[in-house]
Image (cartoon, rainbow, N blue to C red):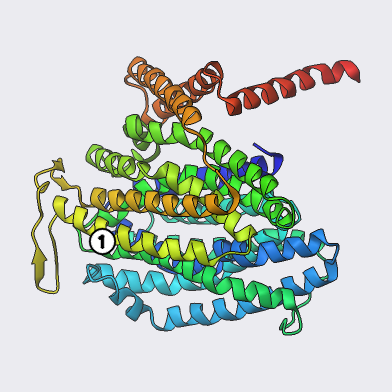
Amino acid sequence: MTPGSVLVATGIFLSRIAGLVRERAIAAYFGTGLHADVLGAGLRLPNVLQNLLGEGTLSASFIPVYSELLGQGRSKDAGRVAGAMFGLLLGVAGVIALLGVLFAPVFVSFLPGFVGERRELMIEIVRILFPMTGLLVLSAWALGILNSHRRFFLPYFAPVLWNAAIIGALIAYAGRVELDALLMAAAWGALAGGFLQFGIQLPAVLALDREIRLNRGRDLPAFREAVRNAGPAILGRGVVQLSSYVDLVLASLLAIGAVARLRYAQTLYVLPVSLFGASVAAAELPELARERGGSQDALRERVVAAVRRVSFLVIPSLVAFILLGDVLVAGIYRAGVFGSADVTVVWITLAAYSLGLLASTTTRVYQSAFFALRDTKTPARVAGTRVLVSAATGAALMLQFEPISFGGWSIPAGLLRDWRVSGVPLGPVGLALGAALGSWLEWTLLHASLARRIGACGTGARRLVQMFGAALVAAAAGYAAHVAGAGMHPLLAALLVTAVFASVYFAAARVLGVAEARAFIDALALRVRARNDGPMER
C-alpha cells in the first residue's frame, strides 16, 4: 500500500474498531430488541443527508478541483473555493437538519413497520440526530481539505471521537435508567460526538490553508465547476442512499429485531469496504486528479495497482466472513442479551453480504477514476441501475424467507419460509443477497465503461486464483485454531482465529507468488531491520 493509503487505512481502522466497540455496547444493552431497532434506524435516517452532501459528493466534485488548484500553485483560489464550498454546505445542511427536526413524524412515517412504541421513540431519536448530521457534513468538508494536502490520518481518525461519545453515554447511564432513557442518552452522545469529530479537524484545516475565506463563489469558475459536478454526484449518492433506505423500509416490515440484525451484519461488512476499498480510493483520488492531464497509460497503471491492492486485502475478508463468520460475530457481539441465535442469523446475513464484497470495494477505485476524469454522470447512472436491481431482488428474496404485514395487508413467505434459526426468520438474508447482486452489476458496468476509456483495468484471473487459494489455506488454519481454542471466551477466540488467519494468508500468498504479499513482507522486513540497526548507527 502507498503511504497515503496506509495512513487512511490506519485512521479508518481505529475508527472502525471504535465502531465495533460501539456496536458491541449496543448489542450488550439492547440485543436485537425494539430499542436496538430504533437506534439502528435512527442513526440511518439522518445518515442519508450526511452521505448525500458529505464525503462521497465532495470526492466527486470538490476534491479534484481543489487538488488541481493546489497542484497549479493557485493557493489563494483554492482557499476561496474551499470557503465558498463551506458556506454552501453549511447553509444546505442547516436547512435540511432543521426540516428534519420539524418534520420528524413525516420522516418516520416512511417506515411503515414502525408503529406504536417504536414510532414514538423513533420520532424522538430523529429530532436529536438530525442536527448531528450537519456537523458530520462539515466534517467531510474538512476531510476533503486535509486529504488534498496529503494529510490523511486525522480526518479518518476523527470518527473515533464520535463513537467514543456514544459509548461513553451508554456506559454512564446503563443500569441507572430504563431502556427508553438509555436510548435517548445514546442519541445525545451521538450529537456531542458530531461536535467533537468536526472540532478536532478544524484547527488543522485552518493551519494548512490560511487563504480560506467565506464567500459566495459566484466569480470562481472552479467553484462553479465543483457545483456542476456535485449535481450528478449527489444523484449518484442519492440512489445509493435510496437503496440503503429501501432496505431499511423493507426490514421494518419484518419481525422486531430484523433492523438490528441487518445493522450488525452491515457493520462488519463495511469494515473491509472502508478499511481497504475506501482507504485506497481516497488516497488515490488526489493523485489520479493530478494525472488527468498526463498519459492514459499512467492513469491506467495507477488504477490497476490500486485495484490489485484492494483485491489482495479484501479477498481474505470475504473468505473469513463466509467460512469463519460465526467466530467473528460471536467475538464482537456475544455479550449481555445478544444470544447464540442472534449470532447465527447475523453470520448468515454477513455471509450473504460478503458475496458482493470484492465488487463493492474495487468499485470504489473505479469511481475515483471517473471522478478524476471529471465524469460524475457515469457512476450516477450505473448506481441508479444498481439500486433498482438490488431493491427488486432483495424484496423478492426477502419474501422467500419471511412473511410481511402492514396496514392490514399481509404477504406470505415463499419457498424458504421454514428456514429459521431457533424460531428466528431469515428475512434479512434475502435483502443482503439482493445487495450483493447489485454490487456485482455495478462493478460490471463501471469496469466495462472505464476499460473502454483507459484500457484493461482489472486484477487479472491468475492473481485472483492465487489470492483465493491463499485465503482458503488461511481459513483452514483459522478453523484449526478455533477447534484448538474451544472453550475460550468468544472475544479471545475471535482474536486468536484472526491472528492465525492473517499470518497464514500473508505467508501463503507470498509462497504462491502474489506480488502484493511479497511487497508487504519485504517492506515490513526493511522496517524491522532499520529499527534494529538504528541504535547502532547512532
Kindly identify the residue that appears in the image at 10 percent across and 48 percent down.
417
Is residue 31 in sight in this rendering? Answer: no
From the viewer's perspective, tell me whether residue 221 is left or right of residue 407. Answer: right
Give above or below for 102 relative to 443: below
Please report the residue visible at 25 percent of the width from the left and 68 percent of the height from the top.
114
Vertical position of residue 3 compared to residue 504: above or below: below
394 or 481, which lies in front? 394
Q: Position of residue 90 (x, y in %)?
A: 62, 77
The C terminus - image quarter: top right
How many neighbours does mark 1 have within 10 angstroms: few (below 14), some (14-19), or many (20 or more)? some
Nearest to the observer: residue 258 or residue 145: 145
The residue positioned farthest toward the right in the image shown: 538
Query: Camera-side residue: 77 or 21?
Result: 77
Q: Quadrant of residue 197?
A: bottom right
42 or 184: which is nearer to us? 42
Label 1, secondary structure: give it: helix
| Picture quarter with the N terminus | top right
Q: How many marks?
A: 1
Vertical arrangement, residue 508 with respect to residue 47, above or below = above
- Residue at 53% across / 82% down in the picture? 95
Q: Is residue 131 visible?
A: yes
Q: Residue at x 42, y 50 (%)?
A: 444
Q: Viewed as shown, does residue 14 lie left or right of 257?
A: right
Quadrant of the rendered structure where residue 404 is? bottom left
Q: Position of residue 200 (x, y in %)?
A: 68, 58
Three-letter amino acid code at the position of disc 1: Ala
Q: Which residue is mark 1?
A: 392
Q: Residue 262 placed where, x, y %?
A: 31, 52
Measured from the top left, where is residue 280 in percent x and y?
Answer: 60, 45
